[in-house]
């Protein structure tokens, strides 16, 4: 290498040119479709703009408006309820599923594929199926409940049941994602730890508690952080299942941002809401990182 960092070796220079050649499309795509919109949304958050009239600079007015907007706190609460209802349930079921499918049983590969299928299936298609399942008049779920003399439940039309309905569907869809991550974590645990525990007389529950769970702390932390970030950005299932209703019972942050941006054309206010959501997610991630840093176990 020269003093200016330029390689003198022709082979290294050729590799650098090819690296730049292959990376350039990705860099252009990132700048055009990620970095530029992010910077633009930050700028828009300081203006009042309805796409028709010229933008009007309002400073921090959009942020102040959000903090005094009852609907902002309502959708933030709904988003928190959705996250609390979805993340722990999904993680627990994903771990149980991974433990079951980590065994040497017949057809285990098929079952893994079937449970992962909802993750890659289109959200809109899945949500339409669940709308049919939840239908109060002819839905499959109420039909099955009627077989055991349980009265029909207004899954999507009741303020009491609408959010649980969205949570149930989201848990079902995300099971495969957590399962795959936990499976990778389980298969990375050294067998000699289980052998040593067995020699010490540990039963199955004690091996799970003192070997499996500690060795899965990094995996659990990763699944938890990504699941919480994903939950705070929930939109598709809310939009197709309930449109935020009934009576805003399922309206979430991203859905409220969508309403302001593309239905009310308050682009500046929607941008400010987006940055407030970013701040909330960032703070949660930092808190989780600091809380888990001393509890994460490495072999």
Image (cartoon, rainbow, N blue to C red):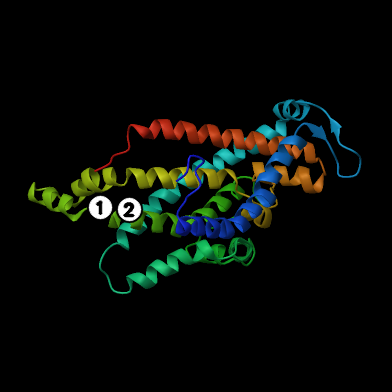
Q: Determine which quarter of the picture holds residue 62.
A: top right
The dot on residue 153 is: none
In the depicted structure, whether residue 128 falls above or below residue 212:
below
In the depicted structure, whether residue 294 falls above or below residue 247:
above
Q: Residues within 10 Å of mark 2 (few under 14, many from 20)?
A: some
Residue located at (80% from left, 48% from top)? 263
Q: Looking at the image, which is closer to me, 31 or 244?
A: 31
Circle 2 residue: 185
Circle 1 residue: 189
Q: Residue 122 at what x, y percent from top left?
A: 59, 64
Q: Are marks 2 and 1 in contact (CB under 8 Å)?
A: yes
Residue located at (86% from left, 36% from top)? 55
**Real-space CA distance between mark 2 and mark 1, rounded to the nearest whole angstrom:** 7 Å
Q: Residue furthest right?
A: 53
Query: Left of 57 or right of it: where is 188?
Result: left
Q: Residue 166 at what x, y percent from top left?
A: 58, 52
Which image quadrant: the C terminus? top left
């Amino acid at each position: 290498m020269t003093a200016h960092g330029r390689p003198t070796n022709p082979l290294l220079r050729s590799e650098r040119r090819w690296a730049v050649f292959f990376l350039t499309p990705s860099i252009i795509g990132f700048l055009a479709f990620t970095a530029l919109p992010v910077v633009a949304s930050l700028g828009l958050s300081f203006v009042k703009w309805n796409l028709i009239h010229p933008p009007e600079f309002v400073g921090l007015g959009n942020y102040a408006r959000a903090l005094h907007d009852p609907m902002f706190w309502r959708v933030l609460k709904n988003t928190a309820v959705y996250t609390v209802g979805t993340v722990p349930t999904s993680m627990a079921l994903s771990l149980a599923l991974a433990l079951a499918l980590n065994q040497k049983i017949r057809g285990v590969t098929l079952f893994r594929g079937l449970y992962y299928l909802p993750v890659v299936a289109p959200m809109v298609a899945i949500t339409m199926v669940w709308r049919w399942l939840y239908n109060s008049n002819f839905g499959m779920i109420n039909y099955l409940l009627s077989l055991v003399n349980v009265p029909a439940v207004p899954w999507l039309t009741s303020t009491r049941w609408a959010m649980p309905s969205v949570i149930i569907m989201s848990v079902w869809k995300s099971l495969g994602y957590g399962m795959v991550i936990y499976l990778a974590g389980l298969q990375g645990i050294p067998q000699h730890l289980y052998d040593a525990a067995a020699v010490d007389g540990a039963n199955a529950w004690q091996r799970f508690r003192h070997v499996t769970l500690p060795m899965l702390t990094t995996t659990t932390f990763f699944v938890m952080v990504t699941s919480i970030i994903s939950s705070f950005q929930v939109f598709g299932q809310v939009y197709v299942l309930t449109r935020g209703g009934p009576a805003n019972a399922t309206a979430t942050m991203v859905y409220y941002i969508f309403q302001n941006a593309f239905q009310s054309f308050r682009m500046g206010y929607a941008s400010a809401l987006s940055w407030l959501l970013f701040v909330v997610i960032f703070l949660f991630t930092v808190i989780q990182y600091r809380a888990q840093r001393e509890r994460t176990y490495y072999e």
